[in-house]
Image: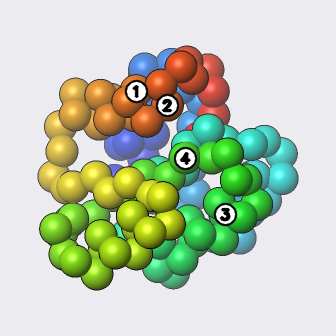
Amino acid sequence: MRSVIRDILEREGYVVLATGDLGTAVDMMNDCAPDLLLTNIDFPTSGHDAAQYLKKRCPKMRVLIVAGLPDDQRIEDRTLGAGFEVFPRPFSVMELNEKIREILGAVSPGSSY
């Protein structure tokens, strides 16, 4: 899933840094300040916990958490309280692109996440 989403976003002109572990994500953030963190709720640690940790390192970064059960009240409570958005699976390429453009607003392709 990670490589498919990376390919989709790169075709849209975004710079994408992709990893499957928190340590590598931290290392990547030492080299740049991403505009958006797109993570899965089931990231090897908790996607939510990883997002909270990374958000502390980069407070201006926006966070979008992909979840298979976005209407689960526990997910909503944790993500909304942290200022994160939840994006339901499954989704189409068009829906993903629209959501990212909505979140990034004025940030244009060429930015990193």
Q: CA distance from mark 2 to mark 4?
A: 8 Å
Specify the amino acid type for callout 3.
Answer: Leu
**For the residue labelled by badge 3, is the local secondary structure a helix, a strand or a loop?**
helix
Dot label at residue 62? 4
x and y, in percent, of residue 59 in the image: 70, 53
Q: CA distance from mark 4 to mark 1?
A: 12 Å
6 vs 44: above or below: above
Earlier sequence position, callout 4 versus callout 1: 4
Give neighbour class at mark 4: few <14, some 14-19, many 20+ (Cα, 10 Å): many
Specify the amino acid type for callout 2.
Answer: Leu
Earlier sequence position, callout 3 versus callout 1: 3
Residue hosting label 3: 54
Dot label at residue 90? none
Asked if the residue under mark 4 is in contact with the one under mark 2, i.e. CB atoms within 8 Å, the reply is yes
What residue do we see at 43% from left, 36% from top?
Answer: 103
Residue hosting label 2: 104
Residue hosting label 1: 101
Q: Which image quarter is the C terminus in?
A: top right
Earlier sequence position, callout 3 versus callout 2: 3
What residue do we see at 57% from left, 23% from top?
Answer: 107
Specify the amino acid type for callout 4.
Answer: Arg
Earlier sequence position, callout 2 versus callout 4: 4
Give neighbour class at mark 2: few <14, some 14-19, many 20+ (Cα, 10 Å): some
What residue do we see at 83% from left, 45% from top?
Answer: 31
Asked if the residue under mark 1 is in contact with the one under mark 2, i.e. CB atoms within 8 Å, the reply is yes
Q: Is residue 53 left or right of residue 10?
A: right
Asked if the residue under mark 2 is in contact with the one under mark 3, i.e. CB atoms within 8 Å, the reply is no
Give neighbour class at mark 3: few <14, some 14-19, many 20+ (Cα, 10 Å): some
4 vs 71: above or below: above
Q: Is any part of residue 47 visible from this angle?
A: no
